[in-house]
Amino acid sequence: MAKLMRKLASALVSLFFASTLSSAAPAKQQKQYLVYVGTYTEQGSKSKGIYAYRFDPGTDRVTPLGLVAKTVNPSFIAIDPNRRFLYAVNEVSDFQGQKSGAISAFAIDRATGKLTLLDQVASRGAGPCYITVDKTGKYVLVANYDGGSVAVFPVREDGSLGETSSFIQHTGHGTNPERQEAPHAHSIDMSLDDRFAIVDDLGLDETLVYPFDGSKGSLSRDQARIAKAAPGAGPRHFAMHPSGKFGYVVNEMGSTITVFDYDPPVGTLKPAQTISTIPKDFSKLDESAEIEVAPSGKFLYASNRGHDSIAVFAIDSRNGMLSLVEYVPTNGASPRNFEIAPGGSSLFVENEKSDDIVLFHIDGATGRLTPAGKVLNISQPVCVKFVAVD
C-alpha cells in the first residue's frame, strides 16, 4: 500500500511540473506584417512613391517605415505569391516618349521593408490603374484605364518583367458621353483556379472573362465571356467569393453592386442581384470604388466616395446574395481603396482626399466595423497590400 502511495505521489508531482512548464511556455506569436501603400505623387501631393509600415495585428501597433521606393504615381500595387517581389503601376500617360504608362518591379527586403527597383517597362497603354499577379507568380497582368486595354507580362526568375506575352485592346463606348466616350479597363483579376482573367471595363459597361493559358501567358479574346452591366453603371472592381461560386462587381457610376452566379468550368457570370451601396435618401454625387469579400465568406464590403462610407453586407451562403448590415463613415474624404488585413480582423481604409488611412476592427460574427483609434497620415494614399514577415 505504501509503495502504491509513493507511485501516486510521484505521478502527481510530475503532473504538476508538466502543467507548470506548459503554462509557462511562451504563446505562439502572431504573424507580423509589412504594409505597403501606393500613392499619387503629382497634382499637389506630398508623397514621393511607395511607403511602408509594420503592423502587429495582436496589438494594432503600426510603425511607420517611411518612403521605401521613390517612383511616380504608384497608384496600385500587387505582391507576388512568394512575397519576394512587389509590382506597381506608374499611372502616367507618357513613358519614355510612348503614349503609355509603366510598370515598376521591385525586390522586397522583408527584414527592413525596403524595395529595390529591378526594372521598369511600358504598360502598353496610358493611365494604368490596376495590377495583379497570377497564382503561380509567373505573370503580371495590368489594366490600362486611359488606354482601354489589358496586357500580360512574364516574370523572370529575378522578378523583372519580360516582353508582353498578351495584349488586348478594347473598342467601343458606353452611354455616358463624358465618362464612357471610350473603353476604360479599370481592373483585372484572376479566377481562383487561374484559368480566367476577369476584367471590368467602366467605359463599356462590361465585365469580360478571358480564358488564360498559363503555359503561354496568353488571353483568348475570341473565347471571352461578357457580362453586361446596366447602361451607365460603370463596372470598376471585382471580387470573388472564397467558394468560387459567386462574383461581385462594384459599379462606380451607379453606386451599386452586381451579384453574379459564377460557373468555374466555363467562366460565365450570370447576374443574380443588383443592390445599392448608398442610402436611398443620399442625393449628392457618389462614386463607389473598392469591393472585398471577408476571408470567412460571410460578409462583403464596398467603399463610397461622396457618401464617404464603407457599406457592409451579409452574404447568403446558399445563393451569394447580399443584405445590408450597415453604412460606416470612414472618418475621412474619398475612400478610394481599402484592404482587409490577413486573418480578417482589421480593415485599412485609404481616404485619398483627406490624406490618411483609418483602421477599423471587424466583428467576425456580425461583420460590423468599429474604429480602432489608429489614423496614419499619408498624402493621397490609393492602395494598400500586406506582406507577412517570417
Image (tube, rainbow, N blue to C red):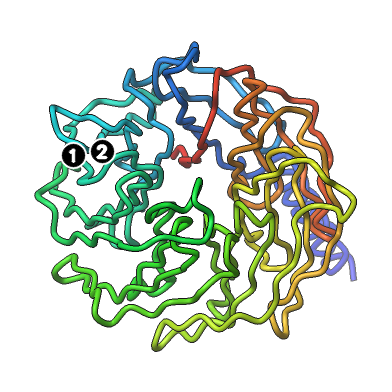
> Which quarter of the figure is the C terminus placed in?
top left
Q: Tell which of 222 and 34 is nearer to you.
A: 222
Residue 195: x %, y % from top left: 33, 76
Residue annotated with mark 1:
122
The vertical placement of 88 against 316, above or below, is: above
Residues marked 1 and 2 touching at CB (< 8 Å):
yes
The answer to whether 368 appears left or right of 381 in the picture is right
Q: Which mark is residue 103?
A: 2
Q: Which of marks 1 and 2 is in front?
A: 1
Q: Name the residue: 33% across, 78% down.
A: 224
Query: Which residue is at a point 44% across and 71% down the rendered structure image?
Result: 192
Residue 48 position by quadrant: top left
- Where residue 84 sits in the image (x, y, percent)? 30, 41
Q: In what element is the residue under mark 1?
A: strand
Q: Distance between the residues labelled 1 and 2?
A: 6 Å
| Amino acid at circle 1 | Ala
Place of residue 4 in the rendered image (x, y in percent of width and height, measured from the top left): 84, 69
Q: What residue type is labelled 2?
A: Ile
Foreground of the two, 268 or 20 = 268
Determine whether the residue tagged by mark 2 lies in a helix, strand or loop.
Answer: strand
Task: Determine the image quadrant of residue 319.
Answer: bottom right
Residue name at image x 38 percent, y 56 percent: 183
- The location of residue 303, given as percent across then percent down, is 68, 46
